[in-house]
Image (cartoon, helix red, strand yellow):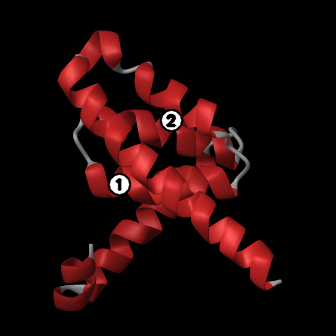
């Protein structure tokens, strides 16, 4: 996304506007939306998307267990390799998110 934002900012903005419209249409709460998006990125090997949406899901109140469950739901459809890759990525993001929370609490 960084390159798109730099090289074609109007296209990136259109994408962000579309994503915002879809979320506004959804009757689901933010946490559930983010968990679903994590499952979708897991099925499509979207490692960068997993990072972003794990952070957002946790900020919206999702637990580590809920994030793992969202990824594991893809297992029967996409198989063990993709699910393991997604789970590895999510666990790294969860660990970084938890370290930031601890550092923020210690500083505050």
Q: Is residue 102 left or right of residue 70?
A: right
Q: Is residue 30 left or right of residue 5?
A: right
Residue 18, image x and y in percent? 42, 62
Residue 98, image x and y in percent? 61, 58
Q: Is residue 106 above or below residue 87?
A: below
Secondary element under disc 1, as helix, strand or loop, is helix
**Would you say residue 21 is visible in this rendering?**
no
The numbered dot on residue 98 is none
Q: Quadrant of the N terminus?
A: bottom left
Secondary element under disc 2, as helix, strand or loop, is helix
Q: Crowding near pointer 2: few (<14 within 10 Å), some, many (20+)?
A: some
- N-terminal-most mark, 1 or 2: 2
Foreground of the two, 49 or 8: 49
Residue 80, image x and y in percent? 24, 18
> Which residue does the image show at 51% across and 31% down from the upper left?
68
> Which residue does the image show at 71% across and 43% down from the upper left?
29
Which residue is situated farthest in the right direction here?
A: 108
> Which residue does the image show at 44% across and 44% down from the upper left?
91
> Which residue does the image show at 53% across and 25% down from the upper left?
69
Q: Which residue is mark 2?
A: 36
Q: Is residue 57 left or right of residue 107?
A: left
Q: How many marks?
A: 2
**Would you say residue 87 is visible in this rendering?**
yes
Which residue is situated farthest in the front direction here?
A: 106
Foreground of the two, 40 or 102: 102
The CA distance from mark 1 to mark 2 is: 12 Å
The numbered dot on residue 49 is 1
Q: Quadrant of the C terminus?
A: bottom right
| Quadrant assignment, res 103 | bottom right
Q: Crowding near pointer 1: few (<14 within 10 Å), some, many (20+)?
A: some
């Amino acid at each position: 996304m960084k390159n798109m934002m730099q090289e074609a900012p109007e296209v990136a903005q259109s994408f962000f506007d579309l994503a915002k419209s879809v979320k506004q249409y959804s009757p689901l709460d933010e946490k559930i939306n983010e968990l679903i998006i994590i499952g979708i990125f897991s099925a499509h090997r979207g490692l960068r998307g997993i990072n972003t949406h794990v952070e957002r899901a946790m900020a919206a109140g999702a637990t580590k267990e809920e994030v793992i469950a969202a990824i594991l739901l893809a297992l029967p459809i996409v198989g063990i390799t993709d699910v393991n890759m997604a789970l590895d990525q999510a666990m790294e993001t969860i660990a970084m998110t938890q370290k930031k929370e601890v550092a923020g609490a210690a500083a505050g």
